[in-house]
Image: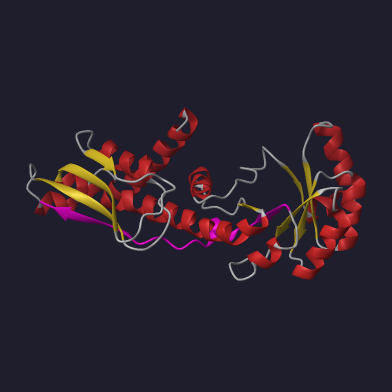
């Protein structure tokens, strides 16, 4: 984990703990649990899936109580057979219970993203097509969710508006055409910039190619239209498919010969994975 990503993770965990505890802390555990009672919490994966988020779970417990011992039993990106013990945390019971929900929220959310990603990756893999994520992420958690995509075998598209050029329909409308939008981008960003253009039909595809796009995103096209786009663009530009992609049709789109398939659902619609903490005294 590099230092910048560690900083982002710590910031996210601190915000989550503050949201749950504020200055009062866990008033239920304080009232019910003897202050020096010690025990062990076992983190259990209850359904099949790809694990992601163990470092954040560890941070949640250790930020609350540095004396807690958190031991992962698997690694992020692993797919243990459920049910499976994936981590153990030992120490004061009150501290374990204080951190339980925050740790599980990160684990369930990120493991859900990793698991859904892995299913798309498996469906596209026979055709050699990469599955990409999008910017349709939970506000404030983009870096974490894109990490989970990688844990599930997917690839990251641009992280934000700051690190990748994608000329969309509103950009084109604002300046009067695809060619003009590409010309402006190339003039400002230079010849080495990787410029991607979104198109909605074959006519716009040809216009984008002629304008000098490096990658063309085929937005909400049907499988047969995408197949024709691949025939027209072969050897001239890389193609990405986006819009309306799901587990039922992703293999069909992958079979067309495109280079990439981007899927917003990886981060905006992934269901949480069933993970629980079981206390042992």
- Horizontal placement of 94 versus 257: left or right? left
On the image, which quarter does residue 80 sit in?
A: bottom left
User: Residue 269 or 248: which is nearer the viewer?
Assistant: 248
The image position of residue 136, as x and y in percent, is 59, 54
Q: Which quadrant: the N terminus?
A: top left
- Horizontal placement of 199 versus 72: left or right? right
The image position of residue 72, as x and y in percent, is 30, 43
- Horizontal placement of 105 versus 207: left or right? left
Residue drawn at (31%, 41%) of the image: 58
Bounds of the magenta segment: 259-281
User: Residue 198 or 116: which is nearer the viewer?
Assistant: 116
Residue drawn at (61%, 56%) of the image: 125
The residue at the far front in this view is 126
The image position of residue 81, as x and y in percent, is 35, 59
Question: Is residue 155 shown above or below 193?
Answer: below
Residue 280 lies in the magenta stretch: yes
Q: Is residue 209 visible?
A: yes
Question: Is residue 194 shown above or below 258?
Answer: above
- Horizontal placement of 235 versus 107: left or right? right
């Amino acid at each position: 984990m590099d230092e910048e990503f560690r900083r982002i993770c710590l910031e996210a965990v601190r915000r989550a703990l503050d949201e749950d505890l504020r200055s009062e802390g866990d008033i239920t555990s304080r009232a019910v649990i003897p202050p020096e009672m010690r025990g062990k919490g076992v983190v259990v994966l209850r359904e099949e899936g790809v694990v992601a988020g163990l470092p954040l779970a560890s941070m949640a417990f250790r930020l609350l109580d540095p004396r807690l011992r958190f031991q992962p039993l698997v690694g992020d990106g692993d797919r243990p057979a459920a049910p499976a013990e994936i981590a153990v945390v030992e120490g004061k019971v009150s501290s374990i219970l204080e951190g339980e929900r925050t740790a599980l929220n990160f684990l369930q959310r990120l493991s859900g993203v990793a698991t859904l990603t892995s299913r798309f990756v498996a469906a596209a893999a026979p055709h050699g097509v990469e599955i990409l994520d999008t910017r349709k992420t939970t506000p404030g958690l983009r870096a974490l969710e894109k990490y989970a995509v990688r844990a599930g075998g997917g690839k990251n598209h641009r992280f934000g508006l700051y690190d990748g050029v994608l000329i969309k329909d509103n950009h084109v409308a604002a300046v009067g055409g695809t060619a003009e939008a590409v010309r402006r981008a190339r003039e400002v960003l230079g010849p080495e910039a990787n410029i991607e253009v979104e198109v909605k039909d074959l006519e716009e595809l040809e216009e984008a190619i002629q304008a000098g796009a490096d990658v063309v995103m085929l937005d909400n096209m049907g499988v047969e239209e995408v197949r024709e786009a691949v025939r027209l663009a072969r050897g001239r530009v890389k193609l990405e498919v986006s819009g309306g992609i799901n587990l039922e049709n992703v293999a069909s789109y992958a079979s067309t010969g495109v280079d990439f398939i981007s899927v917003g659902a990886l981060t905006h619609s992934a269901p949480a994975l069933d993970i629980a903490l079981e206390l042992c005294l």
